[in-house]
Image (cartoon, rainbow, N blue to C red):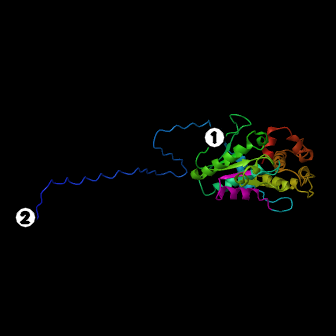
Amino acid sequence: MNEDSFSGPVPPPPPLAAPPMPGFQVQVDGNQNSKIIVAAGSITMKDKPQLPVVNIPQAELDVVRRAWVELDVRDQRVPTAEKAVARLTGNGPRLAVVTGPPGYGKRTAGIKALWEVAQGQSLKLQEIVPDWEKPGSPDVAELPDEPGTGYLLDVAAEISAWQNRGAFAQQLVSYAGELRLSGTFLVVIADEHGWPEAVAGAVAGVVVRATARPSARRVARMHLEYVHHQPGRLHWLTGVPSGTGLAGKAAQQLTDGSRPADAADLARQTRRCGRLPEGSRESPERLPGVAHRRAGRLLRDREQSG
């Protein structure tokens, strides 16, 4: 035996290294504005039936596109819509809650904000119908969250009667925070005092307060010319006398305190009168007070919130 040999048992060969376990990888393409759920086991999703949605009426979209009025009776800017856009596109939740008294153009401002956000991106504009499973106790789980959608939720007529305003508001802020992942936005129209701002700073941080209303006279003129396409009837909405005896008659129905919805109604009526002979039953000389004619109608509640 030479010096390189040795006696004793032969040691076993070293154990083979275990092959590395492949990592768990998921590759998803075309997932923009989509919800992705990855689970290591079986999952069960229990969602309540979602509230119905309808497209925001084209007539209301036409108003914010063609006949938007951003000045009040003192020619000062009304910043409600602009502030709502800032809430929706800022670093916080994709939520703007427009609050204020009736007749301050809140609904129209909310639609204007959604329309502005939709420019340059594919965004459906829809209204959530607040047909809650338990009226008076809304549940965030019932809200839709379709990717790439701008939602309007008008609860101005009911929010003050909700039993769970504080809890719902906090849950809604959390819900809106998740909307960032799906490219979705939400504007809520509330009344003057129904939104529980004092519950938490995050709840107060989504509020846009309507403190000024658009000039009703400007609204009437813009609607008549650019929505109803009757520029030849604009003299009915001014105080300038004319040989027809009709100039300014319609304008007498509006004051500095008139609501934008009243002005929109007046423009519609003036358009109708423009198709009739002077002196007929529905001429401007006999236009009734718009506010009185709309009293008690469901449409009034909807329009006053906007």
Query: Which residue sits at x=87%, y=54%?
Result: 237
Mark 1 vs mark 2: give the one in front: 2
What label does residue 2 carry, if any?
A: 2
Query: Which residue sits at x=55%, y=51%?
Result: 33
Tally the numbered discs: 2
Mark 1 residue element: helix
Return the x and y of residue 5 as percentages of the image width and height.
10, 61
What label does residue 15 carry, if any?
A: none
Q: Magenta segment: does it hold 175?
A: no
Return the x and y of residue 238 as percentages of the image width and height.
88, 56
Does residue 154 appear anywhere in the picture? Answer: no
Extreme residue in the bottom direction = 3
What label does residue 141 carry, if any?
A: 1
Return the x and y of residue 195 as percentages of the image width and height.
76, 47
Magenta-colored span: 77-97
Q: Amino acid at mark 2?
A: Asn
Extreme residue in the front direction = 8
| Side (left or right) of 61 relative to 6 | right
Mark 2 residue element: loop
Distance, label 1 to label 2, CA atoms, is 85 Å
Q: Amino acid at mark 1?
A: Ala
| Quarter occupied by residue 92 | bottom right
